[in-house]
Amino acid sequence: QAGRNPFSPVKDLPILGFFGALSAVLAFLALKQLTICDCLVLTVFDNVLAAAVASLLMGKLRRKRHFRAIKVYTMMCVLVVLYFLGDQGLSNMSMSFPLNEAHILWIASRFFLVTRSIYVKWKYATFHHTKEPSHPPENLLLFYANSRPMLHRFRGFPSPMLSVLDCVFDSGLRDVELHGMGPLGTEDLYNLTEFTYLLPVASLASWLLEDRALSQGLLPQTGTAASTALTLALDAAAVSAAEGAATVQVSGGPQEVRESAGSLDMLVAIALVTIFCISKLLTPMAMSRAMFDRASPIHVWKYQPLMVAAPAFFYDVLSLNSYISKYQICILLLLAAMNAVYRADMWNAFKRKYLLLQTQDLHYQAPSTVRQLQRKTLLQFLEKTSTDDYANMLLETSIGHGTNIRELARDMSVSVWDPSPSSTAAWKLAFSLVTKSLRRQKLLRKQKMDT
C-alpha cells in the first residue's frame, strides 16, 4: 500500500489535531495552580494511562506485558497520593481527596497525549496489516520451530529502521510521543494535526475562559485598571491619620488588587512567550531526531524522559518552589527511581524477546551452529545470567559457529564430542573431489553446447 495515507483528512487528522490542542489547553489551565514538581509527579500517571489504552488497542501481547506490571502501577499511584498528602504525618493526615481540579486537568491533558500516540500506532498497524511477533518459549522448544520466525513487525525498511519501529510500537517506551514511520513522516504528522488545529482551539478557549484578561494580551496584568496593593495601603493610612487613629483600619468590602508590572516583568513575559513559540516550532524536528536519528539509539530511550525532567526538577526545588517539604522531595525521588526501574524492565523484556527470536533464526538458518551442547549452554545463560550477557554469548556463538561453547564446556570438564583428524581430512578430501568432478562436468557440458 505504498503511496497511500493511513490517516483520513476528514476523520483521523481532525481527531489527532483536537486531541493535541485540547491537551495543551488543559495543561495551561492546570499550570495556574500547580508547581513543576506537582506536574512531574502527575506525569508518572502516563505509565498507567498508556497501559490501559495500549491493552485495549495494541493486542494480547501488550496486554499481558502490562498486566505483569500491575503491582508497579499500584505502587506508583500510592506514592502519588502520599506526595499530595504532604508532610503532615499519619496522625494528622487529612481524609479528604488529595487531588483537586488542577490535578484532574493535568491528568486529562496527559490522557489525550497518550491516547493520540497509541491511536497512531494502532492506525499504522491496522493499515499495514501487521502484528507483534510472538514471544518464543524459554526452554528447549525454542529450537523446534518448523519455519523461520518473524523477527520484525514491519517489512520493506532497512534493518536498523525495523529495530527502531519494533521498539516504538512494541516496547512501551514511546507511548506518549506523536510519531510517523520515519523522520519526515513525524514532521508531516505534526504539521497536519497539532499545528493546524492548535491556534483555533486555543483562541476559542481563551475567549471562553480568559475573557477578563484578553485586553492585556500576553503581557502581565498591571495596576492601571484597578487599585494596587500600594495605593490601597496609602489610602488606608491617610484616612487613619486624618481620623487620629493609632492603627491603620481598612473599611469596606474586598477589592480587586493588581500588582503593577515594571519593565523587567514585561521583558520576562515577552522572553517566555518567545521561547515557548520557538519550542513549539521546533517540536516536530526535535521529535523526529529524538526517535529516528542515529544520535538517539533505542537503548538510551529508557532513561531519556528522566534526564529531560531532571533540570526542571532541580530548578523548581532550588529556586521556585519554597513550599515543598523534604518529605515530598523524598517521595518524588522514589517515584523517579521506580519509573527508571519500570522503564528498564520494559526495555529488558523487549530486548530479551528480540534475542530469543534471533536465536530461533540462527537455529533455522545454521542448525550446525546450534547443536545439543550449544542449546543447553545458551538456555543456561538465558536462565542464570542477565540479558546483556546472553546477547554477548549469542553473538560469540554465531561468529564462532558454536566453537566458543565447545571450549567453554571443555574448560568445565564436560565431555565434548570432537571428530578425529582422520575423519575430518576424509570429509575435506571427499568434498574436494566432488567439487572438482562437478566443475569438470559443467565445463564438458559447456564445450558440448558450443560445438
Image (tube, grey):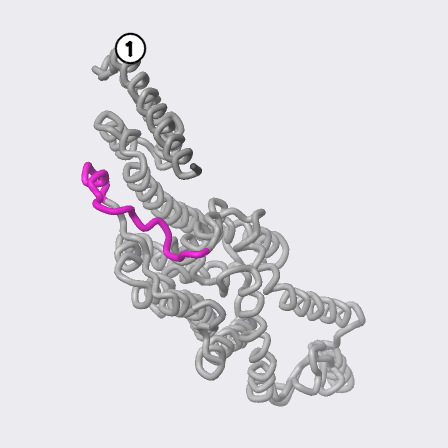
Nearer to us in this view, 94 or 281: 281
Is 106 on the left or on the right of 139, as rendered? right
Q: Is residue 199 above or below residue 86?
A: below
Range shown magenta = 137-156
Residue at x-position 56% and y-position 75%: 192
Question: On the rendered image, what quadrant is the N terminus found in?
Answer: bottom left
Residue at x-position 26% and y-position 56%: 64
Q: Position of residue 268 (x, y in %)?
A: 73, 67
Q: Position of residue 86 (x, y in %)?
A: 43, 59
Is 160 on the left or on the right of 316, as rendered? left
Q: Amino acid at mark 1?
A: Pro
Nearer to us in this view, 410 or 250: 410
Q: Position of residue 237 (x, y in %)?
A: 74, 80
Find disc 1 in the rendering and name its residue: 421
Q: Position of residue 90 (x, y in %)?
A: 34, 56
Residue at x-position 61% and y-position 80%: 199
Q: Quick one: which residue is furthest to the right in this view?
A: 263
> Can residue 411 be seen in this snapshot?
no
For the residue labelled by badge 1, is the local secondary structure a helix, a strand or a loop? helix
For residue 412, which quarter of the picture?
A: top left
Is 317 on the left or on the right of 90, as rendered? right
